[in-house]
């Protein structure tokens, strides 16, 4: 397992790289948006040439929406959550909260069927996966955040843990992989976060991990600090280690800590927690303790 941090375009500076190294990261996940004039196949080919191994993506019309923010973290730390579904339809020319067509006619996007959404994903994967295979790049699908079957009157793709399997099986390939978001999967109303991590890491299908904790289930949940939510992170990381997960783990969002650098403090808190758990799992004394427990039982 490798530890990383997610950086947006404006964070691609020496200062942020130094911060990442100092916090224990060996990798970064770069979050680039607003690239509608580029071509996905070209991006994938260029990534292969540059030695960038994974392209994360969301296949979603409504994208992230309906979040509320408030003092939901321990000690009143500012965090986000959700309080019920969002019905407002998408305006024409907008997808994933981004305007892709400034000249779109007034009005709203008509709803499509769930099967139409899957047909579109299949067409996308059948076009892109062969290019990704040739470039040595993995595509990694993020589940729908928040995970609801319908949002803004449009169907959503992966809103229960078992549906990830349909996505993998749609176009079988090493390049068809998952960006496993622990917080989002934990918010899903069916299944179990630990079984889901077991199922997909055992298949070697997790390209990288978003790690965050949460209290509650969609559409009523709150994001929390890494060590205070519903998810037992030590159990999560133990399953990944047992299944020889080789990819990168990054903190997803964290609550903002009350200080001059709320993002940095939140990130270092989560990264420090993960470093400690990974050190514990690697420690010869932990492994010796486990052997002794097994021998006793
Ligand atoms: Mn995520």
Image (tube, rainbow, N blue to C red):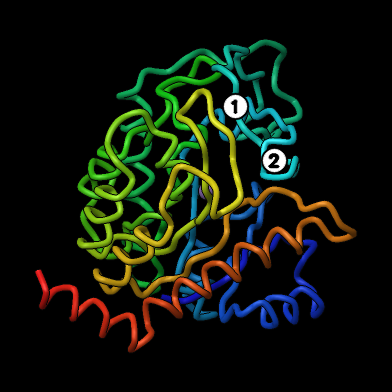
The residue shown at (45%, 20%) is 150
Q: At x 60% / y 68%, what residue is drawn?
A: 271
Q: Residue 290, located in which quarter of the rendered image?
A: bottom left
- According to the picture, the residue beneath numbered tag 1 turns out to be 82
Residue 191 horizontal/vertical position (percent): 27, 36
Q: Which residue lies furthest to the bottom in this view?
A: 284
Using a 10 Å C-alpha cutoff, classify the residue at mark 2 as few (fewer than 14 neighbours), some (14 to 19) or many (20 or more).
many
Tell me how many marks there are: 2
Crowd class of label 1 (few under 14; some 14 to 19; many from 20; radius 10 Å): many
**How much space separates mark 2 and mark 1, taking CA atoms?**
11 Å
Residue 203 in picture, x, y percent from top left: 20, 61
Is 185 or 167 nearer to us in this picture? 185
Q: Residue at x 50, y 56 (%)?
A: 211
**Quarter of the C terminus within the rendering:** bottom left
Residue 239 placement, left or right of 81: left
Which residue does the numbered mark 2 point to in the structure image? 79
- Judge by depth and name the residue closer to the eye, 100 or 295: 295
Question: Residue 205 vs residue 257: left or right?
Answer: left
Badge 1 residue CB within 8 Å of ligand 1 = no
User: In the current view of this chain or complex, which residue is farthest to the front?
Assistant: 296
Res 137 quadrant in image: bottom left
Regarding mark 1 in the picture, which secondary structure is present there?
Answer: strand
Determine the residue positioned at 52% across, 30% down: 61
Q: Is residue 108 above or below residue 55?
A: above
- Above or below, 240 against 49 in this view is above
Q: Position of residue 42 (x, y in %)?
A: 52, 63
């Amino acid at each position: 397992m490798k530890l990383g941090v997610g950086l947006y375009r404006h964070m691609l500076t020496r200062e942020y790289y130094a911060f990442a190294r100092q916090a224990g990261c060996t990798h970064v996940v770069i979050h680039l948006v607003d690239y509608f004039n580029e071509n996905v196949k070209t991006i994938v080919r260029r990534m292969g040439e540059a030695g960038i191994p994974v392209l994360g993506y969301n296949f979603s019309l409504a994208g992230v929406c309906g979040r509320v923010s408030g003092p939901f973290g321990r000690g009143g730390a500012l965090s986000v959550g959700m309080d019920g579904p969002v019905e407002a339809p998408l305006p024409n020319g907008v997808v994933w909260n981004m305007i892709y067509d400034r000249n779109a006619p007034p009005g709203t996007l008509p709803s499509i069927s769930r099967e139409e959404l899957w047909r579109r994903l299949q067409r996308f994967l059948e076009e892109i996966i062969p290019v990704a295979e040739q470039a040595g790049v993995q595509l990694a699908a993020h589940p729908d955040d928040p995970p609801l079957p319908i949002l803004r009157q449009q169907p959503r793709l992966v809103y229960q843990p078992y549906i990830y399997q349909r996505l993998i099986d749609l176009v079988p390939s090493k390049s068809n992989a998952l960006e496993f978001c622990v917080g989002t999967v934990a918010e899903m109303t069916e299944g179990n976060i630990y079984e889901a991590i077991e199922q997909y890491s055992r298949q070697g299908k997790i390209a990288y991990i978003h790690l965050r904790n949460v209290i509650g289930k969609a559409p009523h949940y709150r994001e929390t600090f890494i060590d205070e939510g519903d998810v037992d992170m030590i159990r999560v990381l133990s399953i990944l280690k047992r299944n020889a997960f080789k990819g990168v783990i990054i903190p997803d969002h964290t609550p903002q800590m009350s200080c001059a650098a709320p993002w940095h403090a939140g990130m270092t808190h989560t990264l420090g927690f993960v470093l400690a758990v990974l050190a514990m799992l690697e420690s010869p004394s932990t492994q010796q303790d486990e052997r002794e427990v097994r021998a006793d039982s």
